[in-house]
Amino acid sequence: MKWKTAVAEAMSLTLPLVLTCGAALAQEAMSANYEEIAHRIVTTSAHVKFGDKVVISGGKHVIPLIEALAMEVDNQGGRVVMLLNSERVMHNYYANVPEQYLGDPGLFTDLIKAADVYIRLPGIEDPKTVFQGVPDSRIAKASAAGEVVGKALNQSKIREIDVQVPNQRDAEYAHMEYAAYQKMQWDAINADYQQIAQKGNQLKDLLAHSKLVKITSPSGTNFTLSVGGRPIFVDAGMVNPASATGTPFLARTATLPGGAVSFAPIETSGSGKIMAPKDTCQPYEPLTGASYEFKNGKLINFKAENNGRCFESMLAAGNGAKDMLGSVTIGLNPALKVIEDTADYRPQNASGMVIVGLGTNDLLGGNNKTDSGWLIPVSKATVEVDGKIVIKDGELIM
């Protein structure tokens, strides 16, 4: 589904094109709707208060929202640093920079140490522009920045809000009409997060005291694992500064659209097979009929009907515990829907969606220290926690 090396993500952090302070930008480019969204993100999701030092980053295609957020931070008495990303600069980094310079996180780790809040908008409008034609080996070397940044984030005090602003390219890769895609994303961003938090905490309590989790699906998934008392993280679209103090980074992180429960299972507990009939390797490359077989948490067999070479190439370029069970995420957002019959859309936070991750999981409290990972979507899953069904055929029933 996604090679979660923090490739696009970490590099959107570490390759700023423009650095400016304050919010003296033209207001006419901003819509009234962005003003409302920015107010909600800054005051409710991030809880920015007087004196907070706030970093905002994003690509050129989201400049109006960057401006709106920066002005709202100023209105709340915060101090702003804005990072503007460029796809041309990012492609040059991956494709042309000498290899010995790849993986340097640049100045971003210094910003992490100084900042209280980080609001991250998409740095890339079209991933094909950045990654097409770049060897997997160079992407793997560049992803080392993600490991450095991850460690710095875990040791910081920063609260992070990731805002997944919809764009035309995302809709095209999902094979959806842009109007329908955009509406679903914004509806999900404006979901009832109090209700999501309530369900998330119920599931968290159940998982925290569980012995065995079983995941099955009509396509043939039959997989078991153990939480083993590991931390359970609930993303309900907001971070409370008081409760976030002194906690691991992921307890200080929220996503919009939010709504998910995530954890790092005991790595060696994973056993069985996971089937992903429809998936993507890159957003623009389909991966179909994928089968992943595990023993003692390690991937021992992989095959696919189409484009399996893409996954195999990316896996080979990684290092460390890249082929070990790493994470599980269960979606909670009722406004997001998995659409595979007429589209190719599997939002990770969709209610009832299950994602099983390979590789990196140290930010979740796991033992896999690697700069890479892979997310496997399990559509129409049934999930049992010590025999209690919490998801039935892709529907959250709690």
Image (cartoon, grey):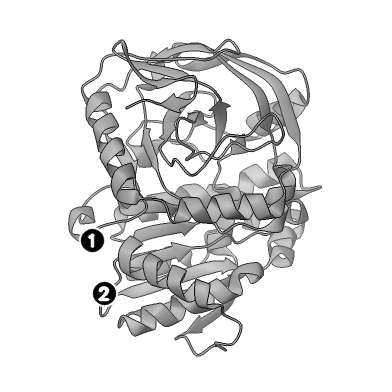
- Residue that carries the numbered disc 2 in the rendered image: 49
Q: Is residue 98 visible?
A: no
On the image, which quarter does residue 375 sit in? top right
Whether residue 398 appears in this view of the structure is yes
* Residue in the image at 77% along x and 56% along y: 129
CB-based contact (under 8 Å), mark 1 and mark 2:
yes
Q: How many marks?
A: 2
Q: Circle 1 sits on which residue?
A: 241
Q: Secondary structure at mark 1?
A: helix
At horizontal 44% and vertical 40% (from top left) the residue drawn is 334
Q: Give the alpha-carbon distance from disc 1 to disc 2, as whole Å.
A: 10 Å
Question: Which quarter shows the C terminus?
Answer: top left
Q: Which mark is residue 314?
A: none
Q: Position of residue 193 (x, y in %)?
A: 34, 50
Q: Which of the pair 287/103 is nearer the observer?
A: 287
Q: Is residue 76 above or below residue 319?
A: below
Image height of 177 relative to 271, above or below: below
Residue 283: x and y in percent read: 70, 43
